[in-house]
Image (cartoon, helix red, strand yellow):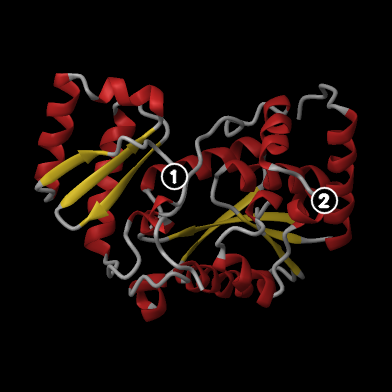
Amino acid sequence: MPKHKLEPILQTKLNQLYACLHAYEKVIVAFSGGVDSTFLAEAAQHALGNNALAVTAISDSYPIREMQAAQDIAKQIGIRFETVHTEELELEGYASNPTNRCFFCKTELFDKLSPIAEKYDVGTIIYGAIPDDVGDHRPGMDAAKGMGIQAPLIDVDLTKAEIREISKVWELPTWDKPAFACLSSRFPYGMRITRELLRQVDAAEQFLYDLGIRQFRVRHHGDLARIELEAEEISRMLAKTVRHDISTYFKTLGYMHVALDLQGYRSGSLNEGVTIS
């Protein structure tokens, strides 16, 4: 880990995080390879060494490219790494896609991590929830809290911006990684989620990724794909050749119509207009 100096407030929070991790003694990190879980895994590896284990869940809602990236990042960090298969699609509460879908996803994840914790005599499972998430619609956090899963980044009040800043100093490849959510978040609530539909969306998003677009979502509305992009990418998308290539490929996937959302990319756009109880 590079030894560049951090701002005093960041160093104080980092020291608090190390103290928190030391108190756990042994941890399993629920590791997606995203900004927050990568930072947490790096911190756990630094604080606990071989007493930290990163576990990545493989499921239909997790793109292959993200799985491969997680393995590469874990190797770079040097943390012990394992994978586990989750089967959230077998749960009606998940597949039917209610507004609390994420509750069932996180429950399934932590259910699968518990036997691994028992196997290695690990008393604490941690995950990368951050203060920015508090107060938002996050039913997965309710599941974690109910199952005794710890969120040390919340405990020491490390925000997304601060995590990115420290990650940059640490030269983690995720310091500027775009936000990512599971593929199931591409479907309007109430639309049943199937493996076939997840693969369809994954293939569509992989095509955009291969075009070099960084932050995007393909929202699935039956035979219509609604593409969300950041503002600077919208003008590029309007180029005739790019429009033609995307539209042609998406139609091979089964989409009859391909639309560009002029409001651009925004996290959780499918929550708009939905009453969350």
Residue 117 lies, with reference to residue 130, above or below; the image says below
Q: Position of residue 195 (x, y in %)?
A: 27, 63
> To which quarter of the image does residue 54 belong?
bottom right
Mark 2 or mark 1: whose residue is earlier in sequence = 1
Amino acid type indicated by mark 1: Glu
148 to the left or right of 198: right
Quadrant into which the N terminus falls: top right
Q: Which residue is mark 1?
A: 66
Q: Please rate how many residues cluster around mark 2, counting C-alpha atoms within 10 Å: few if below 14, some from 14 to 19, many from 20.
A: some
Q: How many marks?
A: 2
Marking on residue 197: none
Mark 1 element type: helix
- Residue 207 percent across, percent down from the top left: 26, 36
Which marked residue is nearer to the observer: mark 2 or mark 1? 2
Asked if the residue at tag 1 contacts the one at tag 2, i.e. Cβ–Cβ closer than 8 Å, the answer is: no
In the displayed structure, does residue 192 sit left or right of residue 242? right
Specify few, some or many for label 1: CA neighbours under 10 Å numbering under 14, 14-19, or 20 or more. Answer: some
Residue at 75%, 54% (x, y): give it.
154
Image height check: is 149 above or below 234?
Answer: below
Residue 59: horizontal and vertical position, in percent?
40, 61
Q: Secondary structure at mark 2?
A: loop
Q: Residue at x 52, y 44 (%)?
A: 70
Judging by the rendered image, the residue that carries numbered circle 2 is 156
Q: Amino acid at mark 2?
A: Val
Does residue 152 sit above or below 100 in this rendering?
Answer: above
Residue depicted at 39% across the width and 42% down the height: 65
Residue at the extreme bottom of the image, as rendered: 92
Q: Is residue 159 visible?
A: yes
- Vertical position of residue 173 compared to residue 133: above or below: above
Front-lying residue, 101 or 167: 101
In space, the residues marked 2 and 1 are separated at their CA atoms by 27 Å
Viewer-proximal residue among 118 and 194: 194
